[in-house]
Amino acid sequence: MKRRLVHLAFALASAALAVPAVLQAVRLQQAARINEAIARAADPAARPGDFAEARFAHALALARTGGYEAGLAAQKALVQQERGALRTAALYNLGNLHLRQALRKGQAAAVESLPLVELAKQSYRDALRADPGDWDARYNLERALALAPEIDAQAAEEKDPPVGKELTITTAPAMRTDLP
């Protein structure tokens, strides 16, 4: 009887430990398929795979080598389709794409590149809303703000003193400017 209980306990423990091992094997196979799809999608001429990670790799490859328009379309599609970390990374890459295109035009076409800088700033802000701890997006936003600083409309209007508002008179004693 005791021997039968020990064998039964061993069988149950083996079955209980086999389930996580099988699950890990399935996850390993899926990770291998995803890695293979990413490797294929890294070629801009290839068709992106069914996995979100492969579409992300394909969008990156298009942005690097396929030109602005192809990369823009792929990144926007990722932003619309994905959620979570991939969407945040796609927003960051979209901002980088706009900023690189603006910098590529140079100082001679500063007026033409201003909308691209504004689009980059908006993409970085969206990425920071999704992940406030993204220091790369924060740094690039600061860089874009240095290229095209924002002027606060209300502060620009308030250069003149407000009309019709009470002026406050201080009751503090005036500072003495003479030496003791």
Image (spheres, helix red, strand yellow):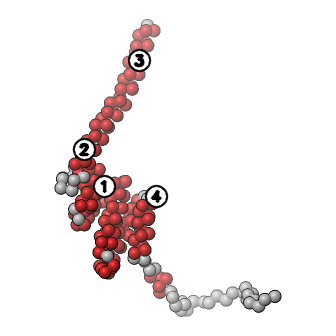
Q: Please state which of the two labelled residues, at mark 2 or mark 4, is closer to the viewer.
A: 2
Kind of residue at disc 3 = Phe
Residue 45 vs residue 72, the one in the foreground: 45
In primary-sequence order, the first of circles 1 and 2 is 2
Name the spot of residue 21 as percent of width and height, x first.
35, 30
Q: Residues within 10 Å of mark 2 (few under 14, many from 20)?
A: few
Does 51 sit left or right of 3 as displayed? Answer: left
Determine whether the residue tagged by mark 4 lies in a helix, strand or loop: loop
User: How far across and how far down the image is residue 7, in percent?
Assistant: 40, 13
Q: Residue at x 40, y 75 (%)?
A: 147
Residues at marks 2 and 4, CA–CA distance in whole angstroms: 31 Å
Residue 51 in sight here: no
Within 10 angstroms of label 1, few (less than 14), some, or many (20 or more) residues? some
Evaluate if marks 1 and 3 touch, with contact meaning CB atoms under 8 Å apart.
Answer: no
Of the residues under marks 1 and 3, which one precedes in the sequence? 3
Q: Is residue 146 above or below residue 97?
A: below
Tell me the number on the disc at residue 133.
4
**Residue bearing the label numbered 3:** 10
Q: Which label is found at residue 82?
A: 1
